Amino acid sequence: MKLNIPVEETIRKRISVRTYEPKSLSEKDKEELRKEISILTNPFDAKVNIHLIEKDIASNGEKLGTYGVIKGAKTFLGLSVDKSEFGLIAAGYQFENLILYATNMGLGTVWLAATFSREQFENAMNIKKNELFPAISPIGYVAGKRSVTESLMRKTMKSDKRKPWEEIFFMNSFENPLSKEEANEYVNPLELLRLAPSATNAQPWRVVKKQGFYHFFETHKSNTKEDEIMIKKVDLGIGISHFHQVALERGLAGNFEKLTDLKLQVPDNTNYVISWKIDK
């Protein structure tokens, strides 16, 4: 389902926000968010749960366990999903759709996968024991000035930098970069995927175009821990959200399929996830 917002415009203006005005969301904004949460879906047939809580916290953000990274936020979103093949991909997809919707409302957000006290938030959001709980986000009104911590983090993580097109998108094999001419009408869906946020700005997505399909992969370093690989699947779901929503906005027809006979030489530490079949 396409989001009822200007998707491309919203993706381009979205930034990660860590410094908020120290006040709760208005009842009107909370109601609008709850309504959107109730109708959000994903194309992977996975049950994704999105939680919204309000909690009075200390002005330095420490009390609820964000290690001083988040300043001023009073409201948080949380993300949980049942364990399944596409659960984490679906979680990233659906939560990012909500974040884009919130951005269009004029609200600030930021994905947090590590810099929060997981146990505290699990308890506050009543996360079930059998659910995966990969991420949260503060949500609120953006402060007029970034905190020193936020400014340093953005500089350290190079938050505004992205890998060049030719390192991410390929034609027929991982040895041949995909040109924008070969991408044709999918230039914008791919470009907006390239701009997607990811944990530590790692950008773990790779895409290969071949014989009427775009094949999506997750990649990681050889020493990456299992829980970090899980987060990279969420990141890929975020990127796929951008790709799919822009494709829908541009009227490009297709559907997601998991192929069992993918005839492609895949590099080490790179995992095939799903493909987008282009409908002619």
Image: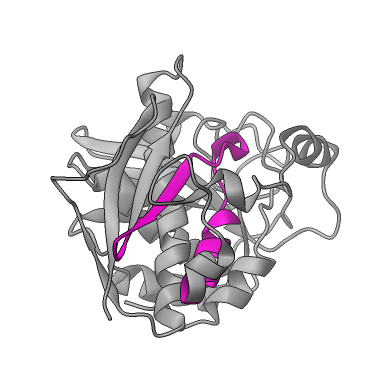
Image quarter where the C terminus lies is bottom left
Question: Which residue is at a point 54% across and 44% down the rendered structure image?
Answer: 198
Q: Nearer the viewer, residue 268 or 20?
A: 268
- x, y percent for residue 178: 51, 55
Q: Is residue 105 visible?
A: no
Image quarter where the N terminus lies is bottom left
Question: Which residue is at a point 59% across and 49% down the rendered structure image?
Answer: 166
Point out the stretch of residues depicted in magenta.
185-213
Question: Which residue is at a point 45% across and 82% down the rendered structure image?
Answer: 249
- x, y percent for residue 176: 49, 46
For this view, does 21 lie left or right of residue 229? right
Q: Nearer the viewer, residue 275 or 106?
A: 275
Coloring scheme used: one colour
For this view, does 182 lie left or right of residue 265? right
- Specify whether residue 208 is painted magenta: yes
For this view, does 22 lie left or right of residue 56? right
The correct choice, above or below, for 13 with respect to 249 in the image is: above
- Specify whether residue 272 is painted magenta: no
Q: How many marks?
A: 0
Q: Nearer the viewer, residue 10 or 181?
A: 181
- x, y percent for residue 68: 69, 32
Tell which residue pokes out farthest to the top in this image: 223
The correct choice, above or below, for 65 with respect to 46 in the image is: above
Question: Which residue is at a point 36% across and 36% down the rendered structure image?
Answer: 122
The correct choice, above or below, for 187 with respect to 117 in the image is: below
Quarter occupied by residue 206: top left
- x, y percent for residue 30: 49, 70
Q: Nearer the viewer, residue 222 or 1?
A: 222
The correct choice, above or below, for 78 with respect to 128 in the image is: below
